[in-house]
Amino acid sequence: MPTSDRSNSCGNPVSLEVLQTNAPRVALAALDTLWFQVGGTICNLRCHHCFISCSPENDKFRFLSLDTCVGYLEESRALGVKEYYFTGGEPFANPEMCDILERTLEFGPATVLTNATLFRDAILDRLQFIDNASIYSLELRVSLDGYSAEMNDPIRGEGTFDRAMDGVRKLAARGFLPILTIARTWDGPDDDVLAAFVKLLRENGYQRPRLKILPLLKLGAEVNRSGGYGAGDFVTHTMMREYDQSRLVCSAARLVTDQGVWVCPILLDSPDAKMGDSLADALRAYPLRHAACYTCWQYGAICSNVASAATASTDA
Amino acid sequence: MSDALQFKTTESPSATRAAPSHRRVAVLGGVYSNYLALEEAIKDARRRNVEAIYCLGDLGAFGPHPDRVFPILIDNDVQVVRGNYDDSIGRGLPDCQCGYTDPRDNHFAAVSYRYTYQQTNERWRPWLAGLPTELRMKIGESRVLLCHGSPRKTNEFLWESTTSTQFLERLCRDHDADVILATHTGIKWRRDLDDDRLFVNVGVLGRPENDGRTNVWYAILEAPSHRTTNEYKHLATESAKRQSATSFANNANDVPQPTERGSHEVLKHGTDKYAVSQPAKGIHVEFVPVSYDHERLAAEMRSEGLPSEFADTILSGHWTTCLEILPGKERRRGRF
Ligand code: SF4
Ligand code: SF4
Ligand SMILES: [Fe+2]
């Protein structure tokens, strides 16, 4: 079983370990979503659970430049990409972030995964302008891990709750409707926790809060429930039989980094997940040889703004 | 369950049948049991001399008395595409396949689904399950594909603000269509694509579109006028001659005015030449507002024990539920 308790900013628990041989391959059905590792691994925060250990010093992956992004945006046009996602590190640590978004919104809708701690007025002015000028939506997804500093800060770092709430307040004041993503770190029903979040956000001037709870891997229970597949660390050929592959990010997405194109954002730290330098290089099938793939297999594409029907299904 | 929605378009018999050809058609979106709006829309479309009426599915949900919708469609010879709701009710699935994740949205979706399921007579289920997942027709020269969500997935949401133009162009290429018509989101919009292709989300009849108005919408599509390209060129030349002889004040009266699609625009600046761009397959799209007795519908919803939130939407024109699926841009236009 994956034993790591780290997760990325999308809440996907990830563990990096030995690779499986002869793994089932997932074809790219279509390139619907193009991710940009626009912040590299550079972040103003250093959350304990950050699966790629982003920090101010980690420059294993560097900021994407505007020119690089535009090159890939142009290449993406012929492939019919539907929407663009931006992650990091912290995207707004990248000094070219607003220029990149402005160009992106000429091509399609954009979603930015941010910690909301770097929203200076100049950035917000720009974002508002860019958003108003496009027919496409600019979505901001803010990760929070609790509705109080007591709940959030032990995970995301001292003072981060207040700083993120300050960012949310500023966004709300300008009419943005950020999506707050919350990793499900509690047991039992969601209602009370959701109600607490809604109350908190309304008190902070965000009247129509959009909230999204991201599932966390519940190892024991889940494995027992999905028994019959001979559950193990890896995705097997049997598990892929009659499985709806559209649940997997890698069936419809690729990730652009400053070092080439990766199969998905989850495997950023895995050199074998690099597929080439252009999008054209990266369109082939990818073998699900990582333990992280097993998590994806169970939970599906939980990174999108609206979870797939599969994720939301009552039988999931 | 999601694989229920992956039904392959190749299964659809419509692909092999010869596609009917029309000049002027009405296309209705989700009905959501709003039989009162459906009746009005059909009457209105007939008044406007359409040759055929199509409906893109989601017949039940939200409103009262789902069984009242089917006879209206059948009696009026409306060609219907199977929506996710129709698929669920028809095949007895546990939910409506809308894919909500928000608990509040899920709650209301479940209430609505349970009611619709219970109130849909058994005898309609095979009919619903047997509806085609896509239909094909021609409008003028254009090959038109009618689907519910998208041509590749019945419950795919295609919102204006989250669907890139190149993605729609890819759908047209992949599905051999010049025009794609869809519904499912609840808000109408259109996008002109390359090579004179076109995407139209026709909106829905089931509930107002979150803009504070109580009317609902459908679409009329019409083939471009019978004039040929040469006739346009001739008109342009004549007009140019006349205008260079007079003034620029009142230009191009004889030249077909730009349609909504803007495809035969008169280029009037910069040169001595007047040109009319290719009139194209330029289908004319008109979104038609439909008023109906919404107060009666709301009253019936209440007396059927449906949530008052639903009736509020009908009366106010603002969505009160299913808000999670709205992208930021569309959501901001509403009140909640
Ligand atoms: S804010 Fe996000 S990228 Fe930065 S350290 Fe925390 S989890 Fe990692
Ligand atoms: S981690 Fe998930 S998205 Fe990435 S290759 Fe594995 S299954 Fe696909
Ligand atoms: Fe639908």
Image (cartoon, rainbow, N blue to C red):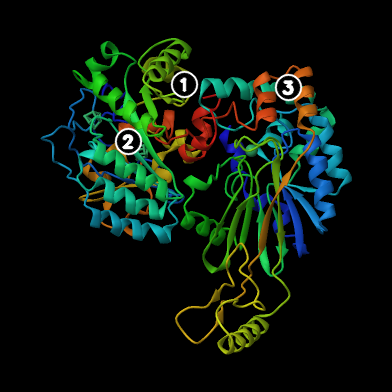
The residue that disc 1 covers is A227
- Residue at left offset 81%, top offset 42%: B40
| In contact (CB < 8 Å): disc 2 and disc 1 | no
Q: Is mark 2 within 8 Å of ligand 1?
A: yes
Contact? badges 1 and 3 (CB < 8 Å): no
Q: Is residue B290 left or right of residue B107?
A: right
Q: State the image coordinates of residue B38 (x, y, percent, origin top left).
A: 79, 40
Which residue corresponds to the image point at 36% horizontal and 20% vertical from the top-left?
A204
Q: SS class of the residue under badge 1?
A: loop
On the same chain: label 2 and label 3?
A: no
Q: Is residue B57 visible?
A: no
Residue type marked 2: Leu
Query: Does residue B152 lie above or below B305 as drawn?
Result: below
Q: Is residue B31 left or right of residue A206?
A: right
Instruction: Report the front residue among A195 and B155.
Output: A195
Counting residues from the start of the chain, the first of labels 2 and 1 encountered is 2
Q: Chain of mark 3?
A: B
Chain letter, disc 2 residue:
A
Q: Which mark is residue B295?
A: none
Image position, residue A141 (x, y; %): 36, 33
Give how far apart the Cα atoms at labels 2 and 1 are. 34 Å
Mark 2 closeness class: few <14, some 14–19, many ≥20 residues within 10 Å: many
Q: Check disc 3 and report the residue beneath it.
A: B115
Query: Residue under circle 2?
Result: A113
Q: CA distance from mark 1 to mark 3?
A: 34 Å
- Amino acid at pointer 1: Gly
Q: Chain of mark 1?
A: A
Which quarter of the figure has residue A138?
top left
